[in-house]
Amino acid sequence: MPSRNGWWMFLPLVAFIGLAVLLATQLGRNTEELPTALAGKPLPTMQLPSLMRTGSEVSNDFFIGHWTLLNVWATWCPTCYVEHPYLMQLAEQGVRIVGLNYKDDAGKAREYLAKYGNPFVEVPADESGRYGIDLGVYGAPETFVINPEGEVVLRYVGELNDRSWQQRFAPVWQKEAE
Amino acid sequence: MVAELGHFCLWLALALAVLQSTLPVYGYVSGKPWLQAVARPAALLQWLFLSIALLTLAWAFYSHDFTISYVAGHSNSQLPLGYRISAIWGGHEGSLLLWVWILSLWGLMVSLLRGRVPTDVHALVLAVMGMIGIGFLLFMLLTSNPFDRNLPWFPLDGADLNPLLQDPGLIIHPPMLYTGYVGFSVAFAFAIAGLIAGRLDPAWARWARPWTTVAWAFLSLGIALGSWWAYYELGWGGWWFWDPVENASLMPWLCGTALIHSLAVTEKRGLFRAWTVLLALMAFSLCLLGTFLVRSGILTSVHSFANDPARGAFVLTFLAIVVGGSLTLFALRAPVLRHRAGFEWLSRDSFLLGNNLLLLTATFVVLMGTLFPLIGEALDIKISVRSPYFNAFFVPLTLVLMLLLVPGMFSNWKKQDGKALLKRLLWLAPVSVVAGAALVAFSDGEMPFVGVLAVIMVVYVILAQLSDWLQKALAFRVGLLRGAGRLTRAYHGMLLGHIGLAVIVAGVTQVSFREVERDLRMVPGDVIEVAGYQFAFSEVVERAGPNFDAIRAIVPVTENGRDIVTLTPEKRTYRVSGQVMTEAALHSNFFRDLYVALGEPIDQAEQAWAVRIYYKPGIGWLWIGSLLLGIGGFLAASDRRYRSKSSEQADAIA
């Protein structure tokens, strides 16, 4: 164990500083506003059957030309029941919402919308959950903001309510007006 | 109201942590013993308030208080009681509370069991632990409060605990692991206190040693439990994946193993002082690094908590302050560590130095393997580090470690006579080679050369422990059992630890080279033979669990017409989250596990299923070996010399 000069005692500190700098740069990467790999990218290719208009398909074209909320929901998701009234309220205010019915039973989903009201302009059904994988969905509910070019602008995991709308969605949504 | 009580207790604990970390240091500097005396009651009260906070959260889970975001996110009205309790540490915020509570528990133990540690050093140790507590309490209160309310819009029911975590193994794995992790904070605190007080002599090593050994034992058990859980719950039949989070727990373990060996040298010989202190600082720093990696979301893993850069930034800052500060202190206090005493190259001292270098190399290998993806990202190249990289290093490192372990044990401190050492190894080496080769030859299955080598090493290490024990016990000349009774607990702990290592290596060798894995398409009525066992896929039935629906396959297993067991692997769909989980079915005995997992349905009409069947020899030895490590650690830490007064006098004589 050399201890005469003492300079080596600083080696661990120097090594640690190098490591800390590396970690800090990586952290910087993640501090992006949008925690999704899809940020700024077009919505993954969608080709899903419509729940309400049997026989027709919903594709990416449906999102072109309008600002749209893409809400991932299911009848097995308790939080979806909670946020449903708020979605109704948004729809009344003229917000265009597409409801991706995720890993659900078509019959139950129709019943749900009949019972609680339908805030969605269109309901693509992702019964297998395949499209959810393309979107990188954790679970339901999740809500994405899609711009008129059909690109993902924001991803929000969890319940959509007045608080999350004001904090996260409103700043993005207002760009539409400008 | 209950949540507010818990929240309030966290702030009180923070206030106490601030008192505990500032007043004793001021008292030490200004020489006021009454200020130093604040540390002990502060630690006690901190534990008390954190216990109340933990109970509060438990109550919230018990009573389904979904107004609390954390409860709503990790529980559900259908969740069985046991999992509602373990859900306390099923997510980021709650596991952090458990972390801090365990830290306070260690603080309480240190404050109660002062032993012969001088009051001023003892107060400094508690002060350092208080500082760590401040960091984690602030982290919790500022970025991840488990008591945050979801008001006024709270969900009617919770989102349920991740089904992966709904498992008995997960009830005890995190507390064990955290107890180990956090336990290294005591060694860390002793190192800092020793640096400040300028006392890093053999007596210091004796104070720090039992704490370190207990922490190491808990960490060993915690890692083994995690591996066991991954093995039977993830349904892949694997037991170690070199996943970043597993690596995060392995690094402090490797470094801690080096530390308990180097503490032995410092205690017995007063050597390796700087080295020992550095290892103590590193072991805890690696624990913090692990925490950072898991909670910052910068690495993806099966275990990751939610990706949150604010949390990452906080932990990184904390890491920089704690590690940077302690390493600076280490560099500045270098003169304190200066100690001149020589040792011959052939001595236990130098063998233990070899042990330390090997273990640190292993730590470095894991660190690099874990950080490669980050380095790659920084340089914009995609690198995937998988098991071949780790195996390429770990196999030779482990074998060399085992090879050197035996002469190290057989050698004297300071200076060992080469001829005497050779004489003891001369019978052991050929016996091990012959016995090891015979074991491989007379058991079923192929084994490559490296496997044979590993078996020989296992035999060699175990025989060495037994022969050393016999020789030492008989040397008292009072008969074997009474002689063994005179050997210390620390010595027995060491033997158990080494045997545990050998047993683990034996298990890994068998399962790596002799497991049989079959991926099959089966329809009811099919029978398949795997490793001498007949697995019959007899029927598929449906079953409803408390919060899931399951499809269950009935698989009777026979061995040449003799019934062994009926295995019932399941595919579970959890009602709330809709997640589908594979619940593997196992049958274990001393020699092997039979493991059946139900894959995906292939054909609904025919009821055809993808089925995975494994025959896993020696897998149970991993858990037995790990248990021996844990028991060995506890035994060694309970040695009389850490409690009795006589050793202090022995120091004076030495």
Image (cartoon, rainbow, N blue to C red):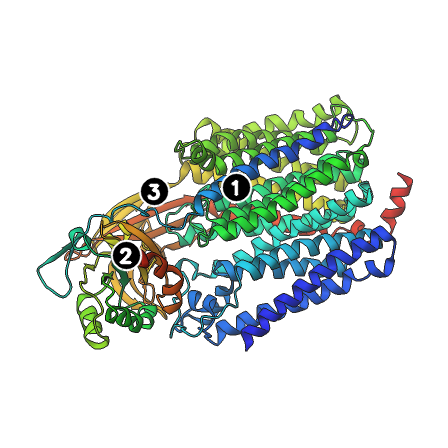
Specify the label residue A24 is tagged with: 1
Q: Residues within 10 Å of mark 1 (few under 14, many from 20)?
A: some
Picture coordinates of residue B172 (x, y %)? 53, 59
Mark nearest the camera among 1 and 3 is 1
Along the line of sight, the residue nearer the viewer: A81 or B462: A81
Does mark 2 fall on the same chain as mark 3?
no
Residue drawn at 45 percent across, 44 percent down: B299
Real-space CA distance between mark 2 and mark 1, rounded to the nearest whole angstrom: 35 Å
SS assignment at label 1: helix
Placement of B487 over or under B547, stated as above or below: above
SS assignment at label 2: helix
Placement of B41 over or under B299, stated as above or below: below
- Is residue B107 shown left or right of residue B10? right
- In the picture, the quarter occupied by the C terminus of chain B is top right
Q: Residues within 10 Å of mark 3 (few under 14, many from 20)?
A: some
Check the residue under mark 2 and report the chain it is in: A
Along the line of sight, the residue nearer the viewer: A151 or B460: A151
Residue drawn at 86 percent across, 61 percent down: B34
- In the picture, the quarter occupied by the N terminus of chain B is bottom right
- Is residue B552 shown left or right of residue B221? left
Does mark 3 fall on the same chain as mark 1?
no
Quadrant hosting residue A78: bottom left
Mark nearest the camera among 3 and 2 is 2
Judged from this view, the residue extending furthest toward the top is B419
Does mark 1 fall on the same chain as mark 2?
yes
Residue indicated by mark 2? A176
Residue indicated by mark 3? B517
Check the residue under mark 1 and report the chain it is in: A
SS assignment at label 3: strand
Picture coordinates of residue A124 (x, y %)? 18, 59
Q: Residues within 10 Å of mark 2 (few under 14, many from 20)?
A: few
